[in-house]
Image (cartoon, grey):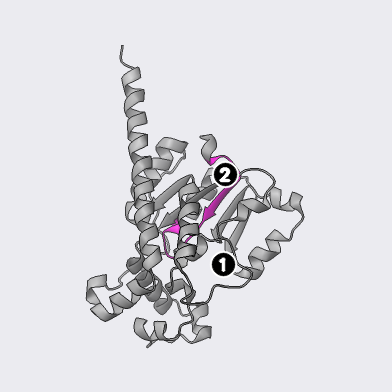
Amino acid sequence: MNPRLSLPLIFLHIFKAGGTSLRKVVRQQYPNARCQVFEGSFPESNAWREQPQEERDACKLLIGHQHYGQHEFLSRPATYMTVLREPVDRVLSYYYFVLRYKQHYSYNYGFHEGMSIKELYGLGRFIELDNIQTRLLNPQPEQQYPFGSIDEAMFEVALGNLRSIQRVGVVDRMDDFLELLRRSEGWSIERTPHENRTSDRPVADAHDEQTLDLIREHNRWDALLYEEAGRLFEKDWADAARHDSAGAGSSVH
């Protein structure tokens, strides 16, 4: 096992960014490790942070919807993993997932089955549609960042934290990201899983330009983060290829 992904491992799961599939893969690598799963609520995360130090340190895997910074509550270094997604595609996937999943909490806060994406943005309430990747790559605030409040300073913090993460993937290269984990980290992944996928949803081009522009406007910082995530992944992918090539060459006599 590569020490860069030694325990404790923190998997920062971005909403609708392939994380449900990857969570299962991570758990399979460490079947006996004590794991803390975060589903995205502040009370849940705060409760974990307030546990005695020995209880927090007993968690060898921290997985789920959480803000960057959980490593500060452990007494030894931790490694991070995350996957980002192109923002327009991510928002559309999230919207149609909620539309299909009638038990989603959004229905308790104003969402209804006939609501359009533009109407949903008009509520100014759902942070999952508003630079959520930048939000989660900032440390957890005392109170939730209001809708529309993400600025350049927060983007710069998120960018720095993204660059510090040991393994960064992007959804449109998920199969390659899993292959990278197989080759570089020695992970055993029998098949490429795709879980919690929002199937049969309209593609981006099926939406009017006004809707797409609205999504872009509220995810401008996430778009920049996604570009950087792609660059980080490509570098790791190229490094792994060079390592494999060098290893093959050294075996020739």
Question: Badge 2 local density, few (<14 within 10 Å), some, or many (20+)?
Answer: some
Q: 9 and 129: which one is in front?
A: 129
Element type at marker 1? loop
The foreground one among 117 and 75 is 75
Magenta stretch encompasses residue 20: yes
Q: Amino acid at mark 2?
A: Tyr
Quadrant location, the C terminus: top left
Q: Residue furthest front?
A: 153
Q: Nearer the viewer, residue 161 or 19?
A: 161
Bounds of the magenta segment: 5-21
Q: For mark 2, what is the residue?
A: 30
Q: Is residue 14 magenta?
A: yes
The correct choice, above or below, for 252 with respect to 210 in the image is above
Q: Position of residue 227 (x, y in %)?
A: 34, 56
Question: Circle 1: is it few (<14), some (14-19), or many (20+) Cα within 10 Å?
Answer: some
Residue pictured at 24% horizontal, 78% vertical: 209
Residue at the disc numbered 1 = 40
Q: Do the CB atoms of the residues marked 1 and 2 lie less than 8 Å apart?
A: no
Q: Which residue type does callout 1 highlight?
A: Gly
Whether residue 116 can be seen here: no
Label whose residue precedes the other's in the sequence (1 or 2)? 2
Q: Nearer the viewer, mark 1 or mark 2?
A: 1
The x, y position of residue 133, in whole percent, is: 45, 63
Q: Residue at x 38, y 50 (%)?
A: 192
